[in-house]
Image (cartoon, helix red, strand yellow):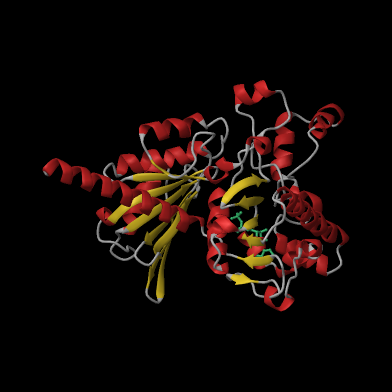
Amino acid sequence: MNILVINSGSSSVKYKLFNMKDESVLAEGMVDRIGMKNAFITHKAFSKDSENVFKSEMDIPNYEIALNLIMNMLVDNTYGVINSINEITAIGHRVVHGGEYISSSVLITEEVERIIKECFDLAPLHNPPNMMGISACKKLLPEIPQVAVFDTAFHITIPRYAYLYAIPYGLYEQYSIRRYGFHGTSHRYVANKAAELLKIPLTEIKMVTCHLGNGCSITAIKEGKSVDTSMGFTPLEGLIMGTRSGDIDPMIVFYLIDRAGMTPQEINSMLNRDSGLLGLSGISRDMRDIIDSAIKGNERAKTTIKCFTYRIQKYIGAYAACMDGIDCIVFTAGIGENSSYIRSMICENLNYLGVKIDEELNSVNGKLSIISHEDSKVKVLVIPTNEELMIARDTAEIVSENLYIQDHESNLQRS
Ligand code: ADP
């Protein structure tokens, strides 16, 4: 079974074709700058021990043309990996927001499309392009089933007392203002992988998963379910990120309007694009650059790293308190997977929880590993995330169930 995973963003479409027999990646790539000058495609086809790369600039005015291009690459004589598009069993789409309605991955029906559209207001930068990707695939490949995998779905289990903000209740009722949480597919993937690695059923572990990439979020997981997460109504809340501020006092916004004469749009842009690691350090949004500067003695870089790790320590402590202790901490995404320096700083104040890092084990980066001492009460793990594989697995599962139901129904009709 081959599953094509599509992630359509505001001006790009990323794709990965999986062979689900062994979960290997047959091809992957990206169409970028859709509708802009200098649009291009990068395509990689993998065979046993080599990869064949194609790169080209071309005119790509819309999503339909982008997806058509992708399909042509997949069956291309030189760069293709399948003989015909019919060898794709199903397509799995990443969709950011499913609001309060969606609790798991689903086969895309008219009703599901309606829900994705209803959430346009909640995720204006993400859901519309996600939907454009779905519509283009439906038009090009009407016979191939399509599945939506939502970033918010994993967090649907967060209890009411944790998702409500203490603002007038009517605003929740009228405008759906509440915590939703994001990065759900990543948190779910690493939580399952952690349970597998520790050889303990997921339902028996109290876990905190730290997704530390350009966007950062942290999730409390109990009995295999998300019970709290740091991102909120939007992905701005919570941890310090590459360019996003994370938690701030909301009154700062009004103060800046009054005292600095900033417009709401300027403040929106400042909080999302000019803050976080970039805003604090004045150096870069890239943690590697900040660590380099800190090592050379730059004081602002040192403070930025301290702010970043301190915020994470606060959340780990809070989530441990909410769950009456934790058994496991997982680090994932660019910073979490690759920076032993940051992991070490985060864990240095967690002795009270029973966290003991083994610095030798912690020096391994980018690989699935346990980095805590053998006698550490709380296990600390590094797990490379793989959201695309999770999307492919969900898609394969849903499609298999559906094919089974269809087969079963047609058998019943025949008998
Ligand atoms: P995205 O959220 O865009 O998927 P990634 O998960 O790729 O982002 O993470 C990007 C972040 O990971 C950047 O801040 C980058 O500096 C950081 N990163 C990658 N490798 C390292 C490393 N070796 N040390 C520290 N940070 C790293």
Residue 184: image x %, image y %? Answer: 56, 48
> Vertically, is 389 above or below 59?
below
Residue 295: image x %, image y %? Answer: 82, 69
Is residue 168 among what the camera can see?
Answer: yes
Closer to the camera, 269 or 215? 215
As drawn, is 406 to the left or to the right of 111? Answer: left
Closer to the camera, 27 or 403? 403
Closer to the camera, 167 or 247? 167
> Vertically, is 228 above or below 338?
above
- Residue lying at 74% horizontally and 35% vertically, measured from the top left: 267
User: Can you say which quadrant of the picture contains the C terminus?
Assistant: top left
Is residue 282 among what the camera can see?
Answer: no
Quarter of image, res 3 = bottom left
- Residue lying at 47% horizontally and 44% vertically, measured from the top left: 104
- Residue lying at 48% horizontally and 39% vertically, measured from the top left: 129
- Residue lying at 46% horizontally and 32% vertically, measured from the top left: 115
Residue 277: image x %, image y %? Answer: 75, 53
User: Can you say which quadrant of the picture contains the N terminus?
Assistant: bottom left
Residue 247: image x %, image y %? Answer: 76, 42
